[in-house]
Image (cartoon, helix red, strand yellow):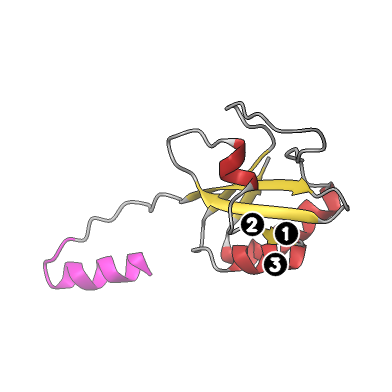
């Protein structure tokens, strides 16, 4: 599409200079509750480190893989998602507290397939 625009513009002596868009990067946090249900939180990457409370007490966390897939489908095309498995900032949490987990391969493969047409990349 950009090449067609450039050709048309050249015929009218207009130059179009457009670089490749930068990808928006999101961070995906995954954990399981005491009763075994999966919880997910998808946040835009920001320069500051997130604390455990930023993750586990965030009201935007969703329950289940279906809810996560719907959230990912709303992202812009070409976005990148990084699965975060560790929090660098310490937090005092009691026994039985949530821990971040890597997604099991079948679940990760299903997510990747569900967004492949939108060119969204998911990586660990």
Left/right placement of residue 18 relative to residue 101 reads: left
Q: Position of residue 105 (x, y in %)?
A: 83, 48
Disc 1, SS = helix
- Which residue lies most toward the front here? 94
Q: Does 66 sit above or below residue 39? A: below
- Quarter of the image where the N terminus is located: bottom left
Q: CA distance from mark 1 to mark 3?
A: 11 Å
Q: Does 44 sit above or below residue 100? A: below
Magenta stretch, residue numbers: 1-15
Magenta region, main secondary structure:
helix
Q: Residue at x 75, y 46 (%)?
A: 31
Disc 3, SS = helix
Q: Quadrant of residue 70?
A: bottom right
Q: Quadrant of residue 116?
A: bottom right
Disc 2, SS = loop
Q: Position of residue 88 (x, y in %)?
A: 60, 27
Which comes before the other along the chain, label 3 or label 2? 2
Q: Residue at x 88, y 53 (%)?
A: 35
Label 1 belongs to which residue? Answer: 111
* Viewer-nearest of discs 3 and 2: 2
Q: Please give the label number shown on residue 123.
A: none
* Viewer-nearest of discs 2 and 1: 2
Which comes before the other along the chain, label 2 or label 1? 2
Q: Residues within 10 Å of mark 3 (few under 14, many from 20)?
A: few
Label 2 belongs to which residue? Answer: 61
Q: Please give the label number shown on residue 67.
A: 3
- Quarter of the image where the C terminus is located: top right
Which comes before the other along the chain, label 1 or label 3? 3
Q: Does 28 sit above or below residue 90? A: below
Q: Position of residue 63 (x, y in %)?
A: 73, 61
Q: Are marks 3 and 2 in contact (CB under 8 Å)?
A: no
Q: CA distance from mark 3 to mark 2?
A: 10 Å
């Amino acid at each position: 599409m950009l090449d067609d625009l450039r050709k048309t513009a050249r015929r009218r002596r207009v130059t179009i200079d457009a670089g490749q868009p930068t990808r928006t990067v999101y961070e995906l946090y995954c954990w399981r509750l005491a009763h075994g249900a999966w919880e997910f939180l998808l946040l835009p990457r920001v320069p500051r480190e997130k604390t455990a409370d930023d993750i586990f007490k965030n009201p935007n966390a969703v329950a289940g893989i279906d809810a996560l897939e719907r959230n990912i489908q709303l992202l812009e095309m070409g976005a990148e998602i990084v699965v975060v498995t560790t929090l660098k900032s310490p937090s005092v949490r009691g026994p039985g507290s949530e821990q971040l987990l890597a997604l099991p391969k079948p679940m990760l493969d299903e997510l990747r397939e569900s967004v492949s047409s939108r060119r969204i990349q998911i990586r660990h």
